[in-house]
Image (tube, helix red, strand yellow):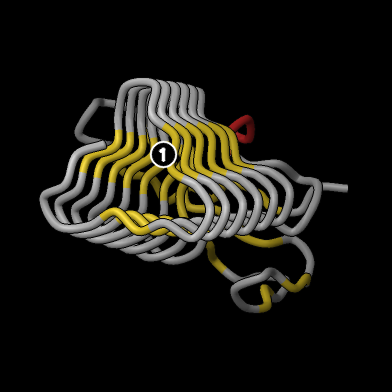
Amino acid sequence: MKKYELTNTSKTMPTGETVYRIRSLRSFDTIYKPVKAGDLGGWVQSESNLSHEGECWLFDEATGYQDSYRSGDSVGYGKSQQYGYSRQYGKSQQYGYSRQYGYSRQYGNSWQYGYSHQFGYSRQYGDSIQYDYSRQYGNSWQYGNSWQYGNSRQYGNSLQYGDSKQCGGSQD
């Protein structure tokens, strides 16, 4: 059974893709807040950007487009954007003005927000948190209870995990 439908309300992204506002066809609870049948959600380019399974959802002005895919119980809200070949699943949350793109993956109980960017082949999972103006890219992995924030950069083949914190102008 379908969870949502595309409305006729559309907008064009700066990269040229047209995205459509979604409307819920049934009521369900997300990890962020409940969705009621008839509620308007965020924006997708097509139904291939947001699964009809699980409790995943896009709220507010959150957008999924190109070949990105959100599934499981993951949510996007605020003005967050997911695009490229990126994937979000598990109980992950993306919000604020954050961006996820490339071939990156976000899952587990991870949070990404603020003006942070995750891209390349990077992975963020576990209970990790990425925010502020931080950047995670390359083949880097962030997991466990780790935090990345400030103007920090994590890239290359780096790993950040455990109870670690990376902040300020640091580079890993």
Residue located farthest toward the right when viewing the structure as drawn: 1
Could you tell whether 28 is left or right of 135 in the image? right
Mark 1 residue element: strand
Kind of residue at badge 1: Val
x 41%, y 39%: residue: 19
| Residue drawn at 29 percent across, 37 percent down | 154
Q: Position of residue 125 (x, y in %)?
A: 57, 46
Position of 27 relative to 168 (above/below): below
Place residue 74 in its image quadrant: bottom right
Relative to 24, say whether 16 is above or below: above
* Along the line of sight, the residue nearer the viewer: 106 or 97: 106
Q: Which residue appears at 58% of the width and 42% of the height?
A: 88
Q: Nearer the viewer, residue 158 or 149?
A: 158
Q: Residue furthest front?
A: 163
Decide which of 44, 162 is in the foreground and name it.
162
Q: Is residue 23 left or right of residue 17?
A: right
* Mark 1 crowd level (few <14, some 14–19, many ≥20, 10 Å Cα): many
Residue 31 lies, in percent from the top left, at 66, 70
Query: If the image is split into quadrants, where does the C terminus sit?
Result: top left
Q: Which residue is mark 1?
A: 19
Asked if residue 76 shows in the view, the reply is no
